[in-house]
Image (spheres, rainbow, N blue to C red):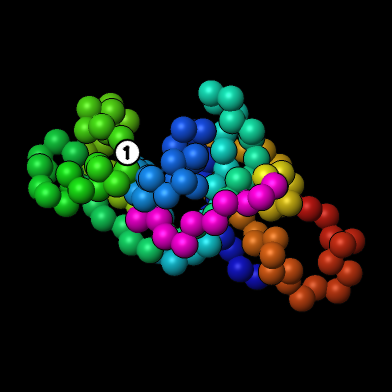
Amino acid sequence: MNFCIMLAINPPHSRNILDGIKRVEWRKRPLVIGRRTFIYETKNGGGCGMVVGEAVISAVRRHFVFSEISYLLCEDVRLGCVPKEELKRYAGKSRVLYAHELTDVIRYSKPAPLSDFFINRPPLSWCYCIDPFERPDLPDWDLHPKF
């Protein structure tokens, strides 16, 4: 069974990712590289509250928020479409933020409900999920309860 990642992303950022404008997603913890990553658009700010697309995390770069003023940080800030001041606010007391480079972005023609991914409630930031496109070889799969 292949486990994937479900990222909860606010509508302006999810739309920028799907449009190819935002290529870096900022998080306080590093996520797994190379996993299929689904994009859940939150209901905040008029979002649909469904899975709107997917991407692959191809690289993760660590940045020290208060001490690093390198070109790499500036490039990641540009690709992440989030101003430095907002990043510092998001970091809070954390001294490190991780820039997750997103590639192979796919926009779904029709948003999918979380139940398709065997998730009962929206993720707060992110969570692991089951890839609905790769059904495991279990007998009577449809008879098994969803998680």
Looking at the picture, how far across and down is residue 28, in whole percent?
Answer: 34, 42
Question: Is 128 placed left or right of 72 in the picture?
Answer: right
Viewer-proximal residue among 86 and 140:
86
Q: Quadrant of the N terminus?
A: bottom right
Residue at horizontal 19 percent and vertical 39 percent from the top? 65
Task: Label 1, secondary structure: give it.
Answer: loop
Main secondary structure found in the magenta portion? strand
Start-end of magenta stretch: 101-110
The answer to whether 16 is drawn above or below residue 54 in the figure is: above
Check residue 5 for magenta coloring: no
Tell me if I can see residue 123 in this picture. no
Looking at the picture, how far across and down is residue 66, in whole percent?
Answer: 14, 36
Viewer-proximal residue among 39 and 144:
39
Label 1: which residue? Answer: 81
| Identity, as a three-letter code, of the amino acid under mark 1 | Cys
Residue at horizontal 12 percent and vertical 49 percent from the top? 71
Could you classify mark 1 by the number of other residues whose Cα lies within 10 Å: few (under 14), some (14-19), or many (20 or more)?
A: some
Looking at the picture, how far across and down is residue 107, in whole percent?
Answer: 57, 51
Tell me if I can see residue 23 in this picture. yes
Looking at the picture, how far across and down is residue 70, in whole percent?
Answer: 10, 48
The answer to whether 106 is drawn above or below residue 67 in the figure is: below
Question: Is 97 placed left or right of 143 in the picture?
Answer: left
Residue at horizontal 34 percent and vertical 49 percent from the top? 24
Image quadrant assignment for residue 68: top left
Question: Is 51 placed left or right of 71 in the picture?
Answer: right
Image quadrant assignment for residue 2: bottom right
The answer to whether 81 is drawn above or below residue 63 in the figure is: above
Image quadrant assignment for residue 106: bottom right
Residue at horizontal 26 percent and vertical 55 percent from the top? 61
